[in-house]
Amino acid sequence: MKFIKKMSGCCIMIVIICFLSSITARAAKSFLEAGDTYLVGLGDILEVQVWNEPDLSRTMGVRLDGVISLPLVGDVVAVGKSIPDLTKILEKKFAELVEEPTVTVMLVESRSRRYYLIGQIGQPGEFSLDYPISILQAIARAGGFTEWAKKDEVVVFRRHGSEEQMLKFDYDAFVKGRNLKKNILVEAGDTVVVP
């Protein structure tokens, strides 16, 4: 009888893992299909290369005022621009200095897209949001729940403009197959609290 109970528990976990994998795959697919473009944010690390002009090429962070500084070009607003748009802007700027410049802009490190986990979590802290991730996956990434965690009272605080939104996630209900839609994707700036 104990063997059957263990097997049914294992089967439930396998179903949950398969479900989570399909959610992540669907989220990544819809993210790509939606044509969402990464927009440069504060603190992001960018590499700007000007072909055959090593003195003009740099790796730099986006300052708190949203600007990057390049030799001879000066300050250029980067925040809110896509990588292709920023590349075009820099090509125009460098065209004043170099004949037919070939500019490449690469995102070296995304520091502007972060989320936070606090409370009864194995490793609370700040995490980068480099790919679509659900609440449950974010908790797993942070080392999972501690022994005294109130798994049925997880809350996500999300800010939209000046409005603060509170979203509830009940882990216990989720693993029993209820409230599956509550395992939403984490967004930049979210704070997940596990009491």
Image: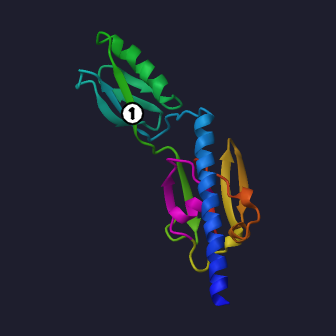
* Residue occupying image coordinates x 28% and y 22%: 51
Q: Residue 184: within the magenta? A: no
Instruction: Classify residue 69 by image quadrant.
Output: top left
Q: Residue 142: within the magenta? A: yes
Alpha-carbon neighbours of circle 1 within 10 Å: few (<14), some, or many (≥20)? some
Q: Is residue 120 left or right of residue 102?
A: right
Instruction: Give the answer, above or below, for where 74 lies relative to 9.
Output: above
In this view of the protein, which residue sits in the foreground, 84 or 78?
Answer: 84
Residue farthest toward the bottom in the current orientation of the protein: 1
The quarter in which the N terminus is drawn is bottom right
Position in image of residue 192 (x %, y %): 62, 60
Residues shaded magenta: 125-144
Instruction: Classify residue 104 by image quadrant.
Output: top left
Q: Judge whether residue 16 can be spotted in this image.
A: yes
Q: Judge whether residue 190 can be spotted in this image.
A: no
Position in image of residue 118 (x %, y %): 57, 65
Q: Is residue 32 left or right of residue 88?
A: right
- Circle 1 residue: 106
Q: Is residue 95 left or right of residue 173?
A: left
* Residue occupying image coordinates x 43% and y 37%: 63
* Residue occupying image coordinates x 47% and y 34%: 65
Position in image of residue 194 (x %, y %): 63, 68
Residue farthest toward the right in the current orientation of the protein: 178
Q: Is residue 63 left or right of residue 2?
A: left
In this view of the protein, which residue sits in the foreground, 127 or 79?
Answer: 127
- Label 1 is placed on what type of residue? Met
Instruction: Give the answer, above or below, for where 79 lies relative to 123.
Output: above
Secondary element type, mark 1: strand
